[in-house]
Amino acid sequence: MLPMSSICRGVRLLAQQHVAVLEFSASCTRPSSSSSSSSLHVPPPACMLRPLEVPHRYLFGPGPSNVPPRVLAAGGRPIIGHLHPEMYEIMNNIKEGIRYAFQTTNHMTLAMSGSGHTAMECAVFNIVEPGESVLVSVNGVWGERVAEIADRMGAKVHTLVKAPGGYFTNQEIEKEISKHKPVLFFLTHGESSAGLAHPVDGIGDICRKYNCLFLVDSVASLGASPLLMDKQKIDILYTGSQKALNSPPGTAPISFNDRACQKLFNRKTKPVSYLLDMTHLSNYWGNDGEPARLYHHTGPVSGFFTLRESLAILAEKGLENSWKQHRQVAEYLWKGLEDLGLQLFIKDKDLRLPSVTTIAIPEGYDWKELLTYMMKHHQLEMTGGLGPSVGMVMRLGLMGYNCSMSNADKALAALSDALKHCKKHKA
Ligand SMILES: Cc1ncc(COP(=O)(O)O)c(C=O)c1O
């Protein structure tokens, strides 16, 4: 039922436009125009004259995850100009927060205006020049994406491929790096499509030995699984805002060390993207030593407020406490899943991503039916696989604000209910 006030507002607006209202239906149909005096041939859509409706959902998939009230409130603060000194101060706070979360002292640290993919493209576009060799490890969808991005900008792309859930030994990585002599090696730390936390130790040393830069994706693992940018010799690291950080989607922290800056600021060609060009972004973020920070693009002001607050929550909690909490809740969840008779996709506990758990599809069940049942009866989101893991797994994420034993119980209860009610198909 629509509130009377919004119906009246809608009718009033339509009357002003001399547009006849045919119906307020549940679907987004357009009222037809019968006016001859209006210059508009597209009338206001009926759906736009109804109030915004957003349901409450338990976001227990691989992200976005639910956002705590404090972060939501930060996003509701009044907008200030993107070039105001107070905004620069907030951006400076964000840089400090990212340095803590990444465990780096890198000067060239900032947040992209955009989702995790923006950071992925920023890293590849700025580091690699057309014709240069890139090595991408692919053991799920994210390596596939980076290989595609590098290919589109004209790099010579080599891939090191395993089935979802597989991981690469340092010997395998060194063999391929020595063979292809890439300028960049890419690895996903938290492979959210497969639920794998990839080991990182020693890879930075291999990259340095062959004068290659080490790029790591931590979109699904930052704050949930231990990662130390400087100690583990990661040259470029990025993440997303909407996973364990619990911000709304739309901003993406990234950091480049001095080795990476050497390469990206000594290019022969300009990066293919103006928006993602680090020469401009480093000025916008006050990282280039210039006295003035100039207009480059209009940053997502509210998104930066929420990111700042999420990073503040992580700093208050402590990174190690956050890692510990994710591990403890994940262990509790994994035991609960096994008690339900389910099998975990990643067999080796030490390789499981604590933020996103992958469950092998139980035999005889249609995974889509299980997910639909949980959404319908529990307002609870889990998802299927992604890219090469589609049809192999269901994904259950408990990240940041959502990472608690009580939410693990809620997810287990929903799964148990779905398993009871969704008909088992004969294999
Ligand atoms: C590991 C990983 N990398 C990259 C991305 C892409 O991030 P976004 O969807 O914010 O662009 C995701 C998103 O789920 C992810 O899990």
Image (cartoon, helix red, strand yellow):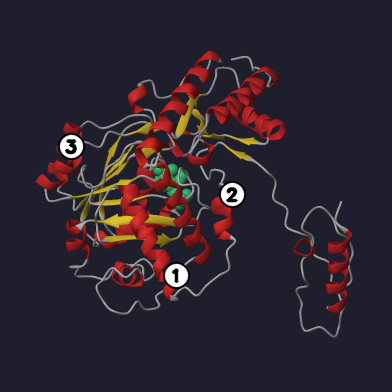
Query: How far apart are the two marked residues, 1 and 2, measured between alpha carbons?
Result: 22 Å
Question: Residue 85 in the image: x percent, y percent?
Answer: 42, 75
In front: label 1 or label 3? 1
Specify the amino acid type for callout 2: Pro
Residue 149 position (above or below residue 139): below
Question: Residue 82 in the image: x percent, y percent?
Answer: 47, 73
Residue 249 position (above or below residue 226): below
- Quarter of the figure with residue 139: top left
Q: Can residue 131 be seen from the camera position used here?
A: yes
Residue nearest the observer in this picture, 204 or 82: 82
Q: Which residue is mark 2?
A: 69
Tell me, for residue 202, which label it has, or none. 3
- Quarter of the figure with residue 383: top right
Residue displayed at 30% across by 56% down: 255
Which of pointers 3 and 2 lies earlier in the amino acid sequence?
2
Residue nearest the observer in this picture, 78 or 419: 78
Mark 1 falls on what kind of element? Answer: helix
Quadrant position of the C terminus in the picture: top right
